[in-house]
Image (spheres, helix red, strand yellow):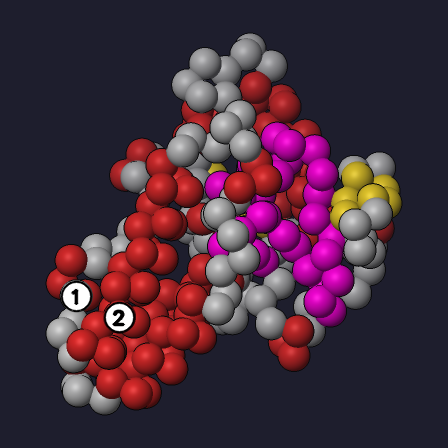
Amino acid sequence: MSGEAAGPDGVPVRGGATAAADPLCGPKYLVLGPLELRRHGVPCTPTPRKLRALFALLLLHANQPVAAEFLIDELWGGRPPRSAPSALQMYVSGLRLVLDPGHRLAGGDARRHPVLRTSAAGYLLAVGPGELDLHVFRDRAARGRELLARGRRAAAGQALRSALALWRGRPLGDLGRSGLPPYYAQRLTEERLAAQRDLRATLSGASSSASAAAWAGPPESAGA
């Protein structure tokens, strides 16, 4: 699984990149640890660092249009080169091929890509229920907090443990400091710590969720 292969456009990917997602294999998009894309449970994550950073940004803002200007600022740390707009388009094209290799081969319009769409407001990565580990984590953690507030500590503990089991290490740790601004990983880590506090509360009976303000979305500039 650790080997690299080239996708249809020559973009290096880790593992195979041919099968569609299988719900029995769990989430296909993983950010709660090293960034990973899976098909039928097989990793097929793109390897170029900037392309991975773009993928991570779009996943963190999944199902929301993200302006090209915002992506450029985040990917190049507020100091983009003149070539940044054309480079972003190249990375988007490469990511589309990794996400759905058959779309272009079938003559599909890039603007009507089934996963990574273009609109007047920017780029939107369409993620379905259960496809992104972060969404699954948040749903399970919220369920745990709800059960805890109702006094069902055993069920709450089970839900929170299943949420925390999705974590595989430092969020997006494989991107390094040059990948994304550090506040993305910091915000995700805060959500993990909040869930851990709530899990401890299932043993003590005192909910700490009031102090667990989870990050709900991108900065306001993302949708500008």
Position of the N terminus, as image quadrant, is bottom right
Q: Nearer the viewer, residue 65 or 162?
A: 162
Q: Where is residue 168 in the image (x, y as percent from the top left)?
A: 54, 57
Residue projecting furthest to the front: 204
Q: What residue type is labelled 2?
A: Arg
Q: Where is residue 167 in the image (x, y as percent from the top left)?
A: 49, 60
Residue drawn at x 21%, y 58% is 212
Residue that carries the numbered disc 2 in the rendered image = 200
Q: Which of marks 1 and 2 is in front?
A: 2
Residue drawn at x 29%, y 71% is 199
Q: Which of 137 and 155 is in front in this view?
A: 155
Q: Which picture quadrant has residue 135? A: bottom left
Q: Is residue 144 visible?
A: yes
Q: Which amino acid does label 1 sit on?
A: Ser
Above or below 34: residue 162: below
Q: Nearer the viewer, residue 148 or 218?
A: 148
Magenta stretch? 29-57
Q: Where is residue 206 in the image (x, y as percent from the top left)?
A: 13, 74
Residue drawn at x 54%, y 32% is 176
- Disc 1 or 2, which lies upstream in sequence? 2
Locate residue 12 relative to residue 194 in the image: left or right: right
* Contact? badges 1 and 2 (CB < 8 Å): yes
Q: Is residue 9 visible?
A: no
Residue that carries the numbered disc 1 in the rendered image = 208
